[in-house]
């Protein structure tokens, strides 16, 4: 009887250890796959938010261009806000027509009739 018990224990202990190790490895793999899927989803959502924010900043630059080109000048406080908007837009990877529009606004005078006030009076 002791011999049978010894044989069973010699086979049962390695079998149980192998089974437990296999279960642990399977669990870890499942967790890794779940974490990878969640990370990919989070990366995709982050990219969508980044693209959306970039689109909103670009729209603000376009709106500012239309407004200040019609006025013919861009006040200093508005220029500072536009600088911050453009830096954020550019930092998010934006660099297209909005850059040209930004540069056109920056070239405007900071007050109306600036050229007239600097010209000599007769």
Image (cartoon, helix red, strand yellow):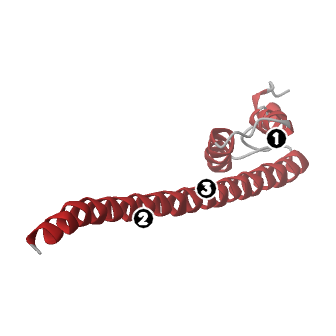
Q: Position of residue 15 (x, y in %)?
A: 30, 62
Q: Residue at x 86, y 37 (%)?
A: 97
The image's mark for residue 27 is 2
**Is 36 situated left or right of 78 in this image?**
left
**Mark 1 Cα-neighbour bin, 10 Å: few <14, some 14–19, many ≥20:** many
Q: Residue at x 22, y 63 (%)?
A: 13
The N terminus lies in quadrant: bottom left
Earlier sequence position, callout 2 versus callout 3? 2
Q: How many marks?
A: 3
**Mark 3 Cα-neighbour bin, 10 Å: few <14, some 14–19, many ≥20:** few
The image's mark for residue 40 is 3
Q: Nearer the viewer, mark 1 or mark 2?
A: 2
SS state under label 1: helix
**Is 100 situated left or right of 11 in this image?**
right
Q: Position of residue 101 (x, y in %)?
A: 84, 39
SS state under label 3: helix
SS state under label 2: helix
């Amino acid at each position: 009887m002791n011999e049978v018990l010894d044989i069973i224990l010699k086979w049962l202990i390695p079998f149980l250890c192998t089974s437990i190790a296999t279960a642990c490895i399977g669990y870890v793999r499942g967790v890794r796959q779940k974490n990878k899927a969640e990370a990919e989803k989070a990366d995709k959502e982050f990219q969508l938010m980044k693209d959306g924010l970039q689109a909103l900043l670009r729209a603000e630059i376009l709106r500012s261009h239309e407004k200040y080109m019609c006025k013919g000048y861009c006040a200093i406080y508005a220029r500072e806000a536009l600088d911050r908007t453009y830096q954020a837009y550019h930092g998010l990877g934006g660099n297209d027509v909005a850059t040209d529009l930004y540069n056109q606004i920056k070239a405007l005078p900071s007050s109306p009739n600036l050229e007239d006030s600097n010209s000599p009076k007769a």
